[in-house]
Amino acid sequence: MHVARNRRTYVAKSGEQRVYESVLVRRTYRDGGKVRHETLANLSALPAEAVTAIEATLKGEHLVPAGQAVTITASLPHGHVAAAHAMAVKLGLPALLGPPGRHRDLALALIVSRVVRPGSKLSTLAWRDDTTLGADLQVTRASTDDIYAAMDWLAARQDAIEAELARRHLAPEPNPERMALFDLSSSWLEGRCCPLAARGYSRDGKKGRLQIEYGLLTDPEGRPVAVRVFPGNTGDPAAFTAIADVVRDKFGLAKMVMAGDRGMITSARIAALNRLEDGTARPDPYGWITALRAPAIRKLMADGGPLQLSLFDEQDLAEITSPDFPGERLIACRNPHLAADRARKREDLLAATEQLLAPIAARVAAGRLAGAAAIGIEAGKVISKHKTGKHFDLAITDTTLAVTRRQDQIDAEAALDGFYVLRTPVPADQLDGPGVVTAYKNLKYVERDFRSIKSDDLDLRPVFHRLEERVRAHVLICMLACYLTWHLRRAWAPLTFTDQDPPEQDNPVTPARRSARAQAKASGQHDAAGRPYRSFRGLLEHLATLTRNQVRYTGTQVTIPMLTEPTAAQRQAFSLLGVPIPLVLK
């Protein structure tokens, strides 16, 4: 017996074409030399599901209830770790870490975990077992000692890892301008026994806390190349000298141009940068780009100096020279938008300080606060809250408090609004004035990396390790995770709010602008197909919904791995990485 479907088509008087289908159960047999068909039942009135079940039964298939056909014995999040691991493999990160082995697998798992689920390394021990990362890298049930051993192994490999990254991104072939960016940041520690822990200037606003400093070296696009950890009281200039020695001596790169902020590349460090230990000049001098501090700019403007407002009547960039900076080019810039913003901010802070002082003056006038010492203590509590105390004169007696602005000083500071001056020994035929400005402003990429490492993506802070080498390994893991994140963000720009093609600036002094496409992403929130744009973290969370299931069919004891059906966004995410969706990581 079998199920036969007969279709009949005819045209009605109205000209409409109609199709009729009849579903019959028939028995086929031979009558002599002829094949005969006997209709046993008409199934046309039955639902399609019932017809399909009868047809399968007649074909000899064994049907079971839908809920008993298969059993899913396990289901683990897969897409997010698979994407991060795929990009790591594409970048050659496993080979970069070192020779194959359990230490390398654990180190790679620590880096991928830091990208996908930022948190302390011990907190991700159980989490890795709850994803396909642990099973596929064979790092399930790793102990605390295993993690620490992998960190120690990775720390010993740091110089070799960074040397290879420098060859990839700072060598003359990939980096013909020989440009490198460097900046310093800090993060606080929990505990007090780490030898690197010290009190210093906190860039996290954690005053009074022990901290470490770490300097990040990148290529001109902000791609992390190396990181160095320093005691928490290390100054910017000392960190710059240390990283310059690393680039020259360990990476073997000559005649580089190092860009750093105004507090890092000081005159003393410049003098020492290209001098050998015996005091003679180095045969392969390094270039540098930095900015002048406000007192030096004020000196250039005073008494008919080379920096005059008339230079900027028709332009916002001018190249000048000064005998105070022999052999150097000074690139003076004036940004009117920055000038207006600083003037507004200064006035707001001055007004806020006066508002804090007004109730104290009212108490003095009403006789509720008396005595010069008492009045001074109360005024001193608020005068520097907004860092504007230098712009006020306080006249205090036992019965009066008079607050006046130092208008001359305010005007002198306002005269510098919007001005900044860059200094460099790099000749103009190697890097013109706008190129110098662009190179210095590219330090924003290092700042972006710091935001990614510290809070946005990788959650470096606070640091919980006690041993010096473990702290260095922790920061190295975060740097390598930042390297991986940098490439993931760029690859996934079409799916996220990242600007895919930021417009090139004809004038580097003017503020950067987003492209029309990025503005459309921010305003519309969806692409042309109606799919939502996501943040980088949101895309990883969406990828996590792509699970790998262990499926066991009824009547068997064998389980097979099977992925859930990917969404369009998940398919595109892997397509942008240039890899198919893997069933297993390796």
Image (cartoon, rainbow, N blue to C red):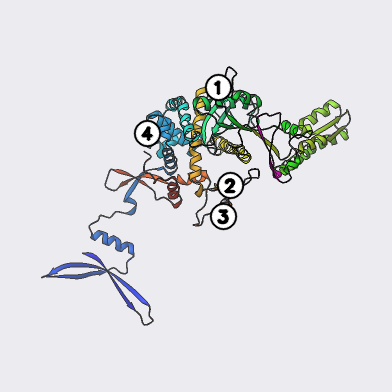
Q: Nearer the viewer, residue 51 or 454?
A: 454
Label 1 vs label 4: CA separation? 32 Å
Q: Position of residue 71 (x, y in %)?
A: 33, 47
Q: Which tag is nearer the camera, tag 2 or tag 4?
A: 2
What residue would you read off at disc 1?
A: 194
Q: Residue at x 57, y 54 (%)?
A: 520
In the depicted structure, whether residue 541 falls above or below residue 194 = below
Disc marking residue 504: 2
> Which of pointers 1 and 2 indicates the residue nearer the eye?
2
The answer to whether the residues at label 3 and label 4 have Cβ atoms under 8 Å apart is: no
Q: What residue is drawn where x is 63% and y is 39%? A: 433
Pick whichever of labels 1 and 2 is earlier in the sequence: 1
**Mark 1 or mark 4, which has the lower sequence index?**
4
**Helix, strand or loop for disc 1:** loop
Q: Which residue is mark 3?
A: 524
Foreground disc of the pair 3, 4: 3
Quick check: can you spot residue 120? no
Residue extending furthest front?
A: 429
Q: In which image quadrant can residue 269 be found?
A: top right
Q: Which residue is mark 4?
A: 138
Q: Is residue 334 magenta?
A: yes
Q: Earlier in the sequence, mark 1 or mark 3?
A: 1
Q: Separation of disc 3 and disc 2 at Cα?
A: 24 Å
Question: The magenta stretch spans which residues?
Answer: 313-337
Specify the amino acid type for callout 4.
Gln
Q: Is residue 89 visible?
A: yes
Magenta-drawn stretch contains 541: no
